Image: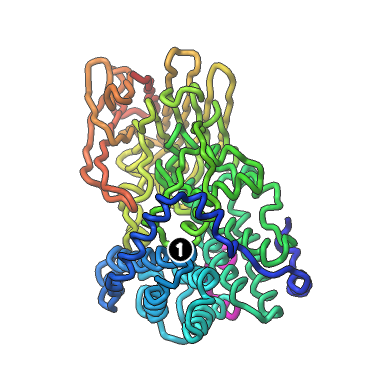
Amino acid sequence: MDLRRWNVKHVRMVLETAPAFAPFPRDVAAIRAGMGQGGIDSLLTQARADALAAVPALPAALYLEFLRNGRREGYEDAQRARRQMLYRLTLAEWLEQSGEFLAAIENLAFARLEETNWAWPAHARTLDFPERPTLDLAAAMTALDMAEVDYLVGDRLSAPMRARLRSEVNRRAIAPFLERNDHWWLHSTPAKQVNNWTAVCVAGVVGAACYFETDLDRLAEIITRGLHSLADYLETFDSQGGSSEGPDYWSYGFGNYVVLAQLLAARTGGQIDLLDDALVREVAQFPLRTVLTQGLWASFSDSDSTPQFHPGLLSYLADQLDLPGLTALGMHNDFHVEGFNQFIWPLRQFAWPLPASKSVFGGTAHDWFAEMGWMISRLDPADPGSLRLAVKAGHNDEMHNQNDVGSFIVAHKGRIVLTDPGRGRYSKSYFGPERYDNLMASSRGHSVPMVNGYAQAEGAAHGASAVMHRNDDAADRLTFEMAAAYPDEAGLKALERDVVFDRVVPGGRITLRDSFAFADKAVRFQSVLVTPLPVQIEDSGVRIGDAAGGVHVAFDPAAVSVETEFHAQVEKQYAPSVDLTRVLFTATGQQATGVVALKISPF
């Protein structure tokens, strides 16, 4: 579907003929049966505790911590606690319909409505003026939260509360979306491409309007504006459905796109169907194609190796697009409402739980995203412990960019041995000018070369070229030129990375060859491997990991020397800090041309 073909008049015509809006059933008997009495009892226990608990405080001083010291967790954690309480109370009342939780729901909703900012501190930076609220991810998500709370239990809330819900959602989200053009995420420009923000913000605002807006002319304007914005979002994916943001942001950005698809289909009687598109079907399969092995995914960009895909999202996509593999990614129904920033996900898990599945999908033998330059190789798809490889070419101006041209990941026995460490802690500096001083975003935190002491440089011009890919029964191979990834000061004339995944050698083997040439004088060249596991330097090579999963790295000691560099407790976002070791393979002497060759074998 070409989303730009929709105009206000056409959308208005569709709305006139649409049936009554009913995105979720009023009769919850089937949902209760799917949860089981144990799940219901657990939810009720939590909700009763929430009804008695104090509402977490959100003082201005907590909001302003980000402005003052760059830390965002204090406010976000307290705000998330408020969200969880409201979600649990609403779901409990929806399922029980007893009135037991209504007073507590109104108390929490009132607190949410009284927050000066719905936007997160990292995005608004300071407290909003009432007439110009910041419309960011959190504000848009809150708008849809409020609308869905109202849909589920609103007929039992007080009339002033329901009026205030609509007024605040309009003031903070719908009106700014419709009336202002200063939202950077609204459309791509030559200066900046949109990303997951577009899907999340549009889904939040347009989704809330589907519930709340009764003026069909205005609703048609809101929907049309959202559809045109989502057209730009879909252009961030390549023709195979690949996204340089990685699997984590597929779950977030595309997940919200799918939520809006459901709501628009319900609001228009299926006449606007955001899933009716060949590219969207490709995008929906991204987690199936980026899985390394059971429970592990390629963690390029600000993604992690163990992303969480929402059960309701997977179940809905599997059903709507006939993609049953999405229900076998190892995710499980969990009716404990913890850790969510959006009501859409616990609600949809309750409504659309995953079917029981005894199998867990761990990928096919090979996947290749030609436009992004991602290759993923699996020695034996039937054996989740067999050798796995993910390697990327790309460039250094990707969405949620890290300077990581040439980065690769190796898994063995279901364990990450050589890592792309994913996202660092989301601080002011991480999204500021100092981003690439952070080990996680710098090429120093990736298994890519250091050249004369220089790391890779930021920008689209700093990327791979002459990418060549091949795969057959004997081997998978990715070769590319990557000298342009480094600043001119590094002095490189050429740098070719050649990665071969050998399928013939028993147990598999990965051969890495970095062939370099300097422009005018010989300087130091190092190939680097990054691991979270123990490292032992031996006469015969380097052992990384142990019997639970590891690799042996062989090299020519006459041509290469080796040393390690340890980084303790590197901070991550939404995950514990991690110890990382950089294993530095330095070409001996200072050569104008040379090769560092490593043979990486599982043990």
Residue 440 visible in image: yes
Q: Image check: 438 left or right of 333?
A: left
Q: Nearer the viewer, residue 184 or 114?
A: 114
Label 1 sits on what residue type? Leu
Res. 460 visible in picture: no
Report the front residue among 152 and 45: 45
Q: What stretch is highlighted in magenta?
A: 178-190
Residue at x 52%, y 75% (from the top left corner)? 154
Secondary element at image label 1: helix
Horizontal placement of 405 versus 321: left or right? left
In the picture of the structure, the residue carrying the numbered disc 1 is 91
Identify the residue at image location x=50%, y=38%: 329
Is residue 253 part of the magenta span, yes or no? no
Quadrant where the C terminus sits is top left
Could you tell me residue 26's position as x and y percent? 58, 65
Residue 10: x and y, percent?
78, 70
- What's the image's color scheme? rainbow
Q: Position of residue 377 (x, y in %)?
A: 50, 28
Instruction: Residue at 30% x, 47% y: name it.
Output: 439
In the figure, residue 78 lies in which quadrant? bottom left
Magenta stretch, overall SS: loop
Front position in the image: 293 or 515:
293
